[in-house]
Amino acid sequence: MSLFRLDASIRSHGSTSRAIADIVEKSWLQGNPDATVTRRHIGLEPVPATAWAQSVTANRGDAASMTDEEKESVALAATLAEELLDAEAFLLAVPLYNFGISQHFKAWVDLVVTDPRLASSAGQPLKGRPGVLVVVRGGAYGPGTPRDGWDHASSWMRRILEDVWGLDLRVVESEFSLVGVNPALDQFKEIAAEMRSESERLAAEHGRYLAGALTH
Ligand SMILES: Cc1cc2nc3c(=O)[nH]c(=O)nc-3n(C[C@H](O)[C@H](O)[C@H](O)COP(=O)(O)O)c2cc1C
């Protein structure tokens, strides 16, 4: 059994997305004690922003005339693609930054799909594999809130993971992680605690789903 885990937080300490993903992972490991976990910390060790264009250009040109940099980018794309192709289940933890997708997550996806095995023309080699996406937001964006509709990241991530790659995806959305950090949000302490507790419950449930999806 093998799990691919990706973390996109730019923090190594105090990260809510990591803490919630840890719950999913722990719950998955309880069901698969001998499982292996392949980790990629794209927030702390980002995929180079230049790699995508080099890999696209290299794939369209003559292999013999590739520059060393292009060869490196194609090789990195192949490594990233293999991490996905080798995994039986997926756990991705991605915070909301500036109302949009983490630039590190976008750079990672863009590069991965330059590998011919995960290009749209290759069909869906990951189709049906189980995955959990943990989305963490500092604020709250539910229906009726002033910023309802301002999260421009989650729908894009779901489009890639569910529709393009075909994962059987479960999502944990955890909001108000900035309550307790930003004093302007102090009035929301109670509801933030309830939301956190619900997202932790769901994380454990989804970890069990990941484990169960592979053992049945
Ligand atoms: C540069 C930056 C931009 C952010 N932009 C948003 C935002 O647009 N909306 C939001 O709800 N939270 C935003 N946040 C808050 C993060 O989503 C929140 O702190 C989250 O918990 C970060 O993930 P982590 O705890 O795993 O590091 C931002 C945080 C940073 C550092």
Image (cartoon, helix red, strand yellow):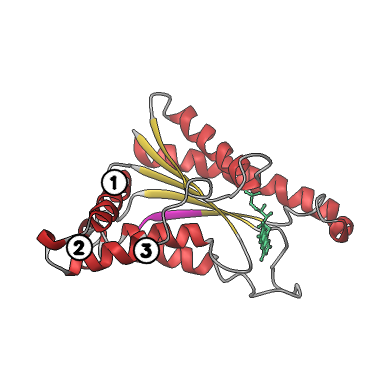
Q: Distance between the Cα atoms at labels 1 and 3?
A: 14 Å
Residue 216 visible here: no
What residue is disc 1 on? 79
Give the magenta-colored segment's residue range: 165-170
Query: Quick check: 182 above or below 26?
Result: below
Mark 2 Cβ inside 8 Å of ligand 1? no
What residue is disc 2 on? 122
The circle drawn on residue 110 is 3
**Tag 3 secondary structure:** helix
Query: Quick check: 215 above or below 130?
Result: above
Q: In which quarter of the image is the N terminus?
A: top left
Residue 109's x, y, as percent?
Answer: 39, 60
| Residue plotted at (73% across, 62% down) | 139
Mark 1, Cα crowd under 10 Å, few <14 / some 14-19 / many 20+, is some
Identity, as a three-letter code, of the amino acid under mark 2: Ala
Left or right relative to 2: residue 192: right
Looking at marks 1 and 3 on the same chain, the residue that comes earlier in the sequence is marked by 1
